[in-house]
Structure formats: structure tokens, C-alpha cells
Amino acid sequence: MISLRYHIISIAAVFLALAVGVVLGSTTLSRSLLSGLNNDNDQLVSQVHDLETQRNAQNARLTDADDFAASVGPMAVRGQLDRRTVVIITTADADPADRDALKTLITSSGARVTGELQLTDEFSNPAKADQVKDIVIRLLPAGVQLPTASDPGTLAGGLLGPLLLISKKDNQPQASPQETAAALAGLTEGGFVKASQGIQPAQLAIVLTGGAAKGDGAGDRAATIARFATQVDRSGAGAVLAGSEGSADGTGAVGVVRADTAATSILSTVDNVRTPAGRVVTILALHEQLNDKSGRYGSAGNAEAPAPGAPDE
């Protein structure tokens, strides 16, 4: 006769067997899983190592390319702007190293820098737009006509363009030295510009900016610089808007210009001025402006070519 004790012992044995099976099975599974994870980790480590090797090789090639462009740059631009004059306009986020490198290349091209004008942060501050407009209208020289557009960038370009560039028609100043001094003084007192001493009007202009606009009102700031540069171009023989990485996207001044067909038809843009090659291209684009041509140059997706005369990518 099977007793209750026998049933209890049998049930206990079954559960013990199940427990032992679970332990053994889980141990085997854990070892298999751990082995698989170790294999995956080894593969990932190998892939990371390969990617680091590729990255280092790519960086080395880029460094070599930059060194080459820096070496041949003065020769590439020689005579491109022979006996021309250039004024440099910088935004608050422009890199001084880019400005200095461009000045060197301008000299190598045979041209002369007539002065520098820095646009401060307040110049493109949307909160100061009305103040900029008031100063522009109040200090407008006699004989200079403002554009019909009412945005601060275009209006400021309508004032500063004729002050900083000579007329394309007769190569004569478009304002008297006294009118220029008064307008620059007013904008300086307002905290909108900083002008180098003895600045004189030139035939051509480079508007040098940074990358993507940041902070509150970034889009408005970029639009102000873009429209300013476009209007400056209309005031003389030509201009180039040059920016660094990020300037060609939607939050950069270069990108704003490239999104405007009317602007790109007259104003040349360069999106990689931080590189030696981009600086050379800026000078070549300025030369192209003398022939009433414009282009979108650089390495961004909305550039039409790396440089003037280069095949489309």
C-alpha cells in the first residue's frame, strides 16, 4: 500500500530533480551566453580599432591637403586682384585667424586692404532692429538712396555699402570723408560697429562670418547678415560672403543667401573659409565678381562646386 509519506517523498524528489535541471540548464546557458558576449565584444573592439585607424589616416590626409593648400595658396592667387582694393567686414563670431590669413592672401593677389569694419553682436540683434533703422535713416549721406526693403540688414547694407565701396561706374567714392566719418561714428556710438582707423572705400568687399548662428533669434541674426552682405555687393564691383562649418545650413548666413535665388545671382558664397583651401577660393571668387559672375563654393551639400572653374560634384 502506498502511504502518504511515499507521496510526499515522490513529490519532493520531482521538485528536486526540476531544481537540479534548472540549475544545470541555466549554468550551461549562462556559459554559452557569456561566451557569445565575449565573442561579440572582441569583434566590436576590432571594429573600433579599424575605425580609429581609418580616422587617423583620414585626418593625416586632410592635414596634408591643408598644408599643401597653405603652401600653394599665395601662388594660386598671384595677380588675381592686381591693383585692386578690398575692404574686410567681419561679424562678431568671425575667427581672427581667418581674417589675418585672408589679408595675407589679398596682398599675395596684388590687392590692397583699405580697412576693416567689425559688425558687433548688437548689429544683428533683433531687439535692436528699430534702432539700427533709425541710425541708418538719420545718417544717410546726401545722394545715397536706400533700398526699398525695410529689414535692418538691407538698410544697413544700403548705408555702409556706399561708404565702404567706390562706385562701380566711375570708381569714385560715393560719400564724402566727412559723411563717412559721421555715419561710422553714429553706428559706433550705438554699439553696432567697430571701424579700423583710416578706413577708406574699396572696389571689393569680403564679408567674413562664423558658422551657424546660435541662441535666441538665431535665424533673424543670420538673415540680417545675409541681407546686409547682399546689399553691400550691390553697392560696388562685388563682394563675397565667407563662412566656416555650419554657415551653409539653415541657421547660417551663407545658407540664408543660398536659399535666395535673387541673392545667389549676384553674391558669391564660400562655406569653408576656416581651411586654407577655402581662403584661396574666397580670393578666386572675389576675382570672379569682377567679371559679374557669382557662385556657391565650398564643401557643403548646397555648394555648386569646390571652387570657381571646378567641375560640379
Image: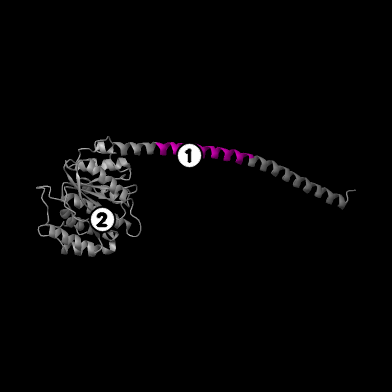
Q: Which residue is mark 2?
A: 118
Residue depicted at x 81% and y 50%: 12
Give amino acid for label 2. Answer: Gln
Q: Quadrant of residue 199?
A: bottom left
The local crowd at label 1, few if under 14, some if 14 to 19, many if 20 or more residues have their Cα within 10 Å, is few
Whichever of labels 1 and 2 marks the residue nearer the N terminus, that label is 1
The secondary structure type at the circle numbered 2 is: strand
Q: Main secondary structure of the magenta part?
A: helix
Count of numbered circles in the view:
2
**Residue 174, image x, y percentages:** 12, 54
Query: Can the viewer see residue 136 in this picture?
Result: yes
Specify whether 4 is left or right of 237.
Answer: right
The secondary structure type at the circle numbered 1 is: helix
Question: Front-most of 186 and 107?
Answer: 107
Give amino acid for label 1. Answer: Glu
Residue depicted at x 28% and y 64%: 127
How far, Cα to Cα, is label 1 from label 2?
41 Å
Question: Front-most of 276 and 220?
Answer: 276
Q: Quadrant of residue 31?
A: top right
| Label at residue 52 | 1
Image quarter (top left, top right, bottom left or bottom right) of the C terminus: top left
| Magenta region, residue range | 35-60
Magenta stretch holds residue 41: yes
**Residue 244, image x, y percentages:** 32, 47
The local crowd at label 2, few if under 14, some if 14 to 19, many if 20 or more residues have their Cα within 10 Å, is many
Q: Going by the picture, which residue comes out furthest to the right?
A: 1
